[in-house]
Amino acid sequence: MNRILYKEQLSDQVFLIRVEAPLIAEERQPGQFVILQVNSDFGERIPLTIADADAQEGSITLIFQTVGKTTRRLAGLGVGDSITNLLGPLGRPTEIENFGRVIAVGGGIGTAPLYPIVQALKRAGNHVTGIIGARTRELVILERETGAVVDELIVCTDDGSYGRKALVTEPLGELCAGYPTPNLVVAIGPPVMMKFCVETARPFDIPVMVSLNTIMVDGTGMCGGCRVSVGGETKFVCIDGPEFDGRLVDFDNMLKRLDAYRDQEEYARQQNCKIDEVGR
């Protein structure tokens, strides 16, 4: 059991929790994630990237958006409540070195896993330009924290309610075409966003590292649920990733696999909403 030490609602659908997990906090590295189960009564297991950690406190920070039954249940927990099962750190850590000039792009909730990577890139001596994108101002997260780390920060919203009215690919394209040429792009967010970040940088022959968040069950490579095609080879996100060279990822195939349980997810969401209404 892992106790929740702190909880904050960042927006209507986005929550931050700090969870007691001393061993994970001590071992985690940027880019790694955990798999959690809110309760043990046949509950779903979901992967969440570790947004931050405090080894002294023995805690990890998780940021998530309520998109389905399990994340709604997680959002319903408060300080002092416990998460039944928490496994990690999982996945390969981010490869950190001094690349030179890096553009770090976070879309929506993807800004959370991007944050520790940006911290590590700066510690390694990189010049980092951050781009944060969200649909609306209310969904922009970690702006202050990311802005305090990067050399420049560009904030975009789809509707123009805050920052620049643009998709993240617009300033990314301008920076890729500028001088000096970036040495690396890191893009984390919805699969469609990552796909188009890759295509934006491709004409300039700039490598793009993406972090994939696929359907995942056990997190050890046994179930095969998280498999993706990378460079024509089958890879498992949980043990081979979650980070890959985006230029090699078959995003179209990945998007089809993510839709495999869409009907079941919608049914579970509707049933959970009915339970909430009865509870009121």
Image (cartoon, rainbow, N blue to C red):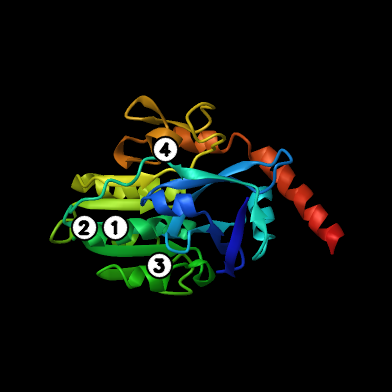
Badge 4 marks a residue whose secondary structure is helix
Secondary structure at badge 3 equals strand
Marks 4/3: CA–CA distance: 23 Å
Residue 169 visible in the picture: no
Going by the picture, which residue comes out furthest to the right?
A: 278
- Checking the image for residue 251, the label placed there is 4
| Amino acid type, residue under disc 4 in the picture | Phe
> Residue at 86% of width from left, 58% of height from top?
278
Would you name the residue on which mark 1 appears? 120
Q: Residues within 10 Å of mark 2 (few under 14, many from 20)?
A: some
Q: Judge left or right: residue 273 versus residue 186.
A: right
- Residue 38 % position (x, y): 66, 49
According to the picture, the residue beneath numbered tag 3 turns out to be: 156
Please report the residue visible at 31 percent of the width from the left and 59 percent of the height from the top.
118
Q: Amino acid at mark 2?
A: Ala
Q: Are marks 3 and 2 in contact (CB under 8 Å)?
A: no
For the residues labelled 3 and 2, the Cα–Cα distance comes to 27 Å
Q: Are marks 2 and 4 in contact (CB under 8 Å)?
A: no
Q: Earlier in the sequence, mark 4 or mark 3?
A: 3
The answer to whether marks 3 and 1 mark residues whose Cβ atoms lie closer than 8 Å is: no
Q: Which residue is mark 2?
A: 124
Q: Given contact means CB atoms under 8 Å apart, are the residues at marks 2 and 1 in contact?
A: yes
Does residue 11 appear left or right of residue 232 in this picture? right
The front one of 103 and 97 is 97
Q: Label 4: how many residues lie within 10 Å, few (<14), some (14-19) or many (20+)?
A: many
**SS category of the residue bearing label 2:** loop
Circle 1: residue type:
Ala
Closer to us: 250 or 239? 239
Q: CA distance from mark 1 to mark 4?
A: 27 Å
